[in-house]
Amino acid sequence: MSTFEKLSINTATIKKASLAEALDLSVAAGLKHIGLWRDKVAEVGLETAVEMVKASGLQVSSLCRGGFLTAAEPAGQAAALEDNKAAILEAKALGTTEIIMVVGGLPDFSVAPGAVDGGGESTAVEGGKDLVAARQRVADRLAELVPFALEHGVRLVLEPLHPMYAADRAVLSTLGQALDLAAPHPVEAVGVVVDTFHVWWDPSLQEQIARAGAEGRIASYQVCDFNLPIAADALLSRGFMGDGVIDFASIGAWVAEAGYDGVVEVEIFNEDIWALPYAEVVDTVKARYADLVEPHLALVRV
Amino acid sequence: MSTFEKLSINTATIKKASLAEALDLSVAAGLKHIGLWRDKVAEVGLETAVEMVKASGLQVSSLCRGGFLTAAEPAGQAAALEDNKAAILEAKALGTTEIIMVVGGLPDFSVAPGAVDGGGESTAVEGGKDLVAARQRVADRLAELVPFALEHGVRLVLEPLHPMYAADRAVLSTLGQALDLAAPHPVEAVGVVVDTFHVWWDPSLQEQIARAGAEGRIASYQVCDFNLPIAADALLSRGFMGDGVIDFASIGAWVAEAGYDGVVEVEIFNEDIWALPYAEVVDTVKARYADLVEPHLALVRV
């Protein structure tokens, strides 16, 4: 019987719930953690959000999200640094050491930082399709942010996104690339997240998860399924574990063998799931987690 | 002024045209090559197709497609070997040395070999989500096909597909993985295709294209764009070069530096393009090719 002590539900999974509702649901479900998006914090204001989280007794497993570091123009780069510093301070105030970084897409195509499900504006620039250059700018901005993150005890957690989002959300596409990007920086300052939806297809996944463990970089294990057919809005093709194509047994075993024994966060963007009663979503997440995810993490729990 | 001597239009780009129409269009456009799908050959029968191609004076740049090698059951594996042997013989009869291989998806999710745009049936099997095992079966079936391909002078051209198709079309997801798969076999028997739509996002693309050139494996360079937003049917998100996110200058230069000086094939699946007059499609392909693709291949043509 699972105690669900490592399970955390991200507010994006119950996107239409308020922060108060999300906290209450997690407490009622017997969970010890919660994953927060910044929009939920902004709805009530940081100070109030901090009080609400404290009163709930829950630990914030991660704050989502910083990033969007690919701007080619100085003004856009300065704005990105400011926004990420604000995110670092929010994470610290909320009592989490982990800020999830979605690094941004090509300048001609990247959505706006706040966009959860599509939309956002971008302006075409010279060289706006140059992927190599955009990736270099991510490395440059990351180096500028690391001292601030270290100073505040918050880790910048690089999230490789599925290659279908390489142009509009994240030029960071594989776990190996994330580890290369993290390599110059202290492990306290830069980590990586293994999100099954984004990395399940990668032929080098087992090797790179082992490397991430050996290098002390695994900051989070996020789980949800990859649904087929791909949703008409490709961002929303995430599903409950078991509803899609992902082999959670293999990936869970690799994560466990890599020594990760931290929180497992469930983050699902899916119109149908967003339309369900919140409690039903939480119940399904718990059942699928207990059935398909937790058993394969047993290696690190004995 | 381009001579279009290296340009080949794949029949999938003008999917609704008959074989006769596709041949006439290519000849009228001053092209020297054509890329064929097996469905166009089957419509008239192999013998007639061979005669029509000969009469046109065109060279078949590749035949699409063999593959679908991931079956877990002996009957499915035997059927796949038979179908691929037939494809090899068709390629030989049509005068091309290149048969494009789409290796197939996870047994639980893979579309049927004949499916061009969705559909297809599959049957759930034990371990049907085990990606590592499915990839091993591709290697096993490939080894069984190599002697037959060598005997008939046809090269099995491995096509890595975009990771968004890893479950339903090809568990082969990167150029590096394709080269690893090809490595045990003679270069005359197993090659790889660089299709911009499938590989543009890969952080190791420059390195792997250089490797493919050094190892003598580049059998084809296929170009089309990756359109955003992703089409509701994700298979159909291919576009005319210039309409999407891909940097053809960088990738073209890498292919040229790798020593490839062969045919460039344009293969686009797109409902809007399929609805256009065929001649308009051919004209647009030629214009975009001359503007965005050919100039970057100049390195190998001087």
Image (cartoon, coloured by chain):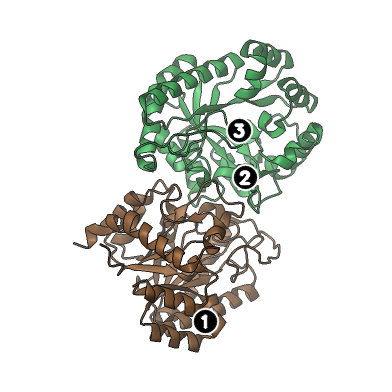
Chain colours: A green, B brown
Instruction: Give the residue type at disc 1.
Output: Ala
Write the residue at 39% across / 27% down: A141
Q: Secondary structure at mark 1?
A: helix
Q: Is residue B67 left or right of residue B199?
A: right
Is disc 1 in contact with disc 3, using a CB cutoff of under 8 Å? no
Say which chain tag 1 marks: B
Which of the pair B70/B246 is nearer the observer?
Answer: B246
Which residue carries the number 2 mark? A233
Q: Can you give x and y, in whole percent of width and height, for residue A104 in the image?
A: 47, 34
Q: Are callouts 2 and 3 both on one chain?
A: yes
Q: Can you give x and y, in whole percent of width and height, for residue A292 in the image?
A: 71, 45
Q: Is residue B233 left or right of residue B23?
A: right
Instruction: Give the residue type at disc 3.
Output: Val
Write the residue at 71% across / 21% down: A19
Q: Can you give x and y, in whole percent of width and height, for residue B239 in the image?
A: 48, 55
Q: Is residue B119 left or right of residue B11?
A: right
Which residue carries the number 1 mark? B86
Say which chain tag 3 marks: A
Say which chain tag 2 marks: A
User: Is residue A70 among the parts visible in the rendering?
Assistant: yes
User: Is residue B61 among the parts visible in the rendering?
Assistant: no
